[in-house]
Image (cartoon, helix red, strand yellow):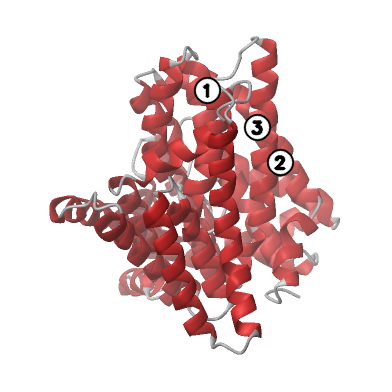
Amino acid sequence: MLLLLGGFLVLMLLGVPVAIAMAASSLLYILVSGVTPDVTLAQRMIAGVESFPLLAVPFFILAGNLMNIAGVTGRIYKFAVALVGWMRGGLGHVNIIGSVIFSGMSGTAIADAAGLGTIEIKAMKDHGYTTEFSVGVTAASATLGPIIPPSLPFVIYGMMANVSIGALFLGGVIPGIVMTLLMMATVTYFAHRNKWGSDTPFSWPQLGSAGLEIAIVFSFPMAIWLMTLAGMSTNLAVVIGLGALLAIDWYFDFSAVMALMAPVILIGGMTLGWFTPTEAAVAAVIWSLFLGLVRYRTMTLKTVAKATFDTIETTASVLFIVTAASIFAWLLTVSQAAQLLSDWMLSITHNKWVFLALANVLILFVGCFIDTTAAITILVPILLPIVLKLGIDPIHFGLIMTLNLMIGLLHPPLGMVLFVLARVARLSVERTTVAILPWLVPLLVALIAITYIPELTLWLPKYMGLSK
C-alpha cells in the first residue's frame, strides 16, 4: 500500500500529470510486488473504458462545444437579462440564471465557465462591476454544471457505483435549485452592501416575454400528457408538440425557448423510457446540431469540425484518466489498501452522519489535488462499501461526492475552473483565488444542506420511481 500510494503522491508532488502518476505508480507496484503479470496493466486499463455508460462522455462534451458555437450562449444571456437583469446586482443574477440554463445542456463546469464566462465577465466589467466580483460569481455558478442534469461526473459515478444514472440526474434537480437560491441570495447581499442598483430598467414587456418563454416550455410536457390522455400515441403527441413549439418559436423569434427545451427533452425522454442516459447524450448532440444548423443557422462545417476536434482532444484526456484510475483503483482493492482504509474509517465511527462529515473533508481535500474523474474512480471503491454498510443511499452519496469535487475545481493547485477564469478575466491565479473565496460560503452551506437533508436529493428519484 505504501509503495502504491507513496509512488503516486511523490509523482504528483514532482508535477507529473495525475493520469501518468497513477499509471506509473501502478506499474511500479506490479513490477516490485509481482502480485500480477505486468500485462494485467494494459488489460485492466482497456477494461476500464469498455463500458456503455462511458459513451455518454464524448457526446455530452460535443453537445457543450456545439452549444457554444451555435450562438446559444448569447441567447441564454439575453433571456436571463430580461428575466432578472432589473434586480439589484442584476448581472450577478443574470450570471447565475444563465449558468442554470446552460447546465441543462453541457453537463460540465469547465464548459460553463469557458462558454458563458467570456460573455458574462465582459458584460459585468462594462457595467462597472469589479473584475473580482465578476470572476467570483462566474466561478460559483459554474459549479451548477455537473449538479443540474445532465452531468458527466454523474455518468462516471453511476458506472463506478453501479447505480441508475437517470436517478442521479433527477437527484441533482432540487440540490441545483437550492444552490441557485443561495447564490442569488449572496448576490443580493453584495448588492445591498455596495449599494448597487439594477443593470436594466424594469420592463413589463421584457419580463412578460421571458415569463411567456418559461410558460411555453413548461406547457410542453403538459400538452403531451393531455394528448396521450385523449388517446393519442406518445410518439405522435411529441411530434405534434415539437412541431407546434418550433412554429411558435420561429414566428415570435424567442430568445431561449429552444435552448430551455434541451433539459426538458433529455429528462423527459429518460423518464418516458425513450432512451437511456447514454442515448440522451446523443439526443443532446442532435438537438445542438438542429439549433445551430437549422433553427439559428449559426454553424458552418468549419465550426462543427472544430468542435469535433476539440471534443476528441478533451475525450482522449478524460478517458486516459479513467483508464489509469481504473487500474489504480483495482490495485487498491487487490492490495487490501481499500479495505484497510475502510476499516480505519469504521474504527473512528459507525455513525453515518459523522462518517458523512469525515467523507466531506476527505473528498474536499482530494478534489483540490486530483481531477474530478480520477477522484471519483479512486474514491468510489474505497468509500462505497462503507456507504452501503452504514445504510446511506448511494444516489445521495453521489450528489455529495460530486458537489465536493466541484468545489475542489475552484481551488489551487489543480482547480481547472480557477485557471480557465483566470485566463478569461486576465487575472493572476492569486487574485482569482481571493475573488472566489467569499463564494465558498453559499457552496459550503449548500453542501451541508445536501449532506444532512437526504430528501433534497432522493425525493424526486423516488417520486419518479427510479429509487427505492
Farthest-out residue, left: 302
**Residue of label 1:** 200
Residue 316 screen position, x and y as percent:
28, 58
| Observer able to see residue 31 | no
Q: In the rendered view, tell whether residue 374 sits above or below residue 236.
A: above
Q: Which residue is mark 2?
A: 446
Left or right, residue 439 beside residue 71: right
The residue pinned by badge 3 equals: 184
Left or right of 342 on screen, residue 32: left
Residue 205 seen anywhere in this rendered image of the structure: yes
Amino acid at dot 1 = Thr
Alpha carbon separation for disc pair 1 and 2:
29 Å
Asked if the residue under mark 1 is in contact with the one under mark 3, i.e. CB atoms within 8 Å, the reply is no
Using residue 288 as the reference point, say whether residue 99 is left or right of it: right
Q: Secondary structure at mark 2?
A: helix
Amino acid type, mark 3 = Met
Quick one: SS at disc 1? loop
Q: Are marks 1 and 2 in contact (CB under 8 Å)?
A: no
Q: Residue at x 45, y 60 (%)?
A: 328
Seen at 63% across and 59% down, the residue is 398
